Image: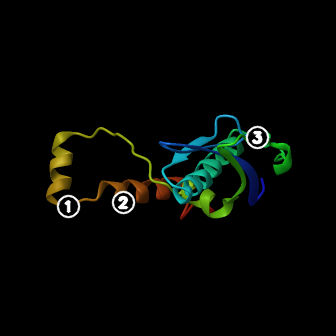
Amino acid sequence: MKDRYIFPALLDYAEDGISVEFPDLPGCLTCGDSEEEALRKAKEAMALHLYGMEQEGELIPEPSKVKSIAAERNQAVLLVEAWMPPFRHDMENKAVKKTLTIPKWLDDLAQENNVNFSHLLQDALKKYLGVKDKSS
């Protein structure tokens, strides 16, 4: 895994917006109404795509050279950078929704006592698993 990836993106300008694709990352697509939005979404899409590849143990290809990508008249090629450490941190600490079942009487009592189920479950899991945070 690398901390920094830079891949060429192909921006396709149309009347209804700008679509973005990454020739080296099949399936990594996004779009935006402006260049600024398209670039922001391109960085997010690329980081998410690369994170998924990392998690699946897939080989991340070497990026193509910009000059080797043929752009049509309504297209432009630019380099997009993804700085992965903060993205990985956000993904690994992202909240996930869990559904659980408890007896109604226990739910009633917990609500009467203003129990925060998320914090209680997190604390209980950490205690049960013997950890304080992700790294321990």
- Dot 3 or dot 2: first in sequence order is 3
Nearest the eye: 113 or 39: 39
Nearest the eye: 102 or 8: 8
Residue 114 badge: 1
23 above or below 84? Answer: above
**Name of the residue lying farthest toward the front:** 73
The CA distance from mark 1 to mark 3 is 51 Å
Q: Residues within 10 Å of mark 2 (few under 14, many from 20)?
A: few
Colour mapping used in the image? rainbow
* Left or right, 54 with reference to 136: right
Identified by mark 2, the residue type is His
131 above or below 13? Answer: below
Q: Residues within 10 Å of mark 3 (few under 14, many from 20)?
A: some
Q: Which residue has dot 2 on it?
A: 119
Identified by mark 3, the residue type is Asp
128 above or below 12? Answer: below
Identified by mark 1, the residue type is Asn
**Residue 30 pos. (x, y %):** 56, 43
The CA distance from mark 1 to mark 2 is 12 Å
Question: Given contact means CB atoms under 8 Å apart, are the residues at marks 3 and 2 in contact?
Answer: no
**Residue located 51% across and 55% down the image:** 34
Q: Quadrant of the C terminus?
A: bottom right
- Dot 1 or dot 2: first in sequence order is 1
